[in-house]
Amino acid sequence: MAVAGITETTQYLTFKLEDEIFAVDINKIREVLDYTNITKVPKTPEFMRGVINLRGSVVPVVDIKLKFGMSKTERTVNTCIIIVEVLFEGETTVIGALADSVQEVLDIEPDHLEPAPRIGTRLNTEFIKAMGKKGDNQFIIILDIDKVFAEEDMAVIKQSTEAQ
C-alpha cells in the first residue's frame, strides 16, 4: 500500500537514534555538523539542549531522542548535529537536531514506503510520514520534520533564539 502524496523516488538522509534508523527528506536538510559546544538556555524544556553559533546565526539545538521518550543523546565520535529547516506558521525556522550518527543518503521508491502504523488513538504518530523498507527486514522511520515539534515546542524554540 503506497503512501498518499508520495509518487516519486525521494532522497532521504538517514540517521540513527539508539538502535533505530530514521530519515528526513533531503530537501529539509541544510547541512550536517560535527558535534560542537552547545550553550544551554535557562528555563527551557529538557529536549531543548541549547543554541550554537552557525556562521553568526543563533541556531537552537534539540535532542530528538528526548522528544521521542528515549535517553538523552550522549556525545561520541559519531554524534552530530543535523541542521534542518522546519516550517512553522508560514516561516522557515532553522533548527539543529542531535543524532547518534548519520548513516547515508538513500533513494527510496514510493513502492518501498508504507503508511505510518495506526497504534490506537492514544499515541500520536502524525510526525511519521512513512515507514521505508530497506532490504528484506529493515525499516526506516521517515519523519515529517515539520510535525515533530508541536506548536508549544516551536514557541519555546523561537523564544530561546530571540533571547540570545
Image (spheres, helix red, strand yellow):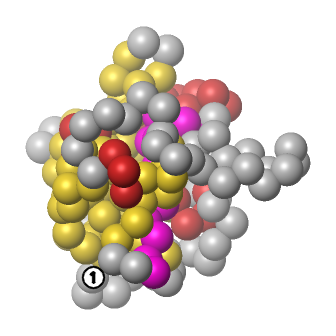
* Magenta stretch encompasses residue 143: yes
Q: Quadrant of residue 155?
A: top right
The residue sitting at 57% across, 74% down in the picture is 72
Judged from this view, the residue extending furthest toward the bottom is 77
Question: Which of 164/58 is in front?
Answer: 58
Quadrant containing the C terminus is: top left
* Magenta stretch encompasses residue 3: no
Residue 54 picture location, percent across and down: 19, 46
Q: Is residue 83 visible?
A: no
Question: Which of 20/67 is in front?
Answer: 20
The residue sitting at 31% across, 64% down in the picture is 14
The residue sitting at 63% across, 28% down in the picture is 151
Q: Please give the range of residues in magenta.
A: 137-149
The residue sitting at 24% across, 44% down in the picture is 10
Q: Give left or right: position of 164 versus 56.
A: right
Q: Give left or right: position of 1 versus 164.
A: right
Residue 163 picture location, percent across and down: 46, 32
Question: Which of 1/88 is in front?
Answer: 1
Judged from this view, the residue extending furthest toward the top is 90
Q: Quadrant of residue 58?
A: top left
33 shown above or below 52: below
152 shown above or below 72: above
Residue 45 picture location, percent across and down: 65, 51
Q: Amino acid at mark 1?
A: Asn
Q: Quadrant of residue 69?
A: bottom right
* SS state under label 1: loop
Q: Which residue is mark 1?
A: 78
Q: Is residue 92 visible?
A: yes
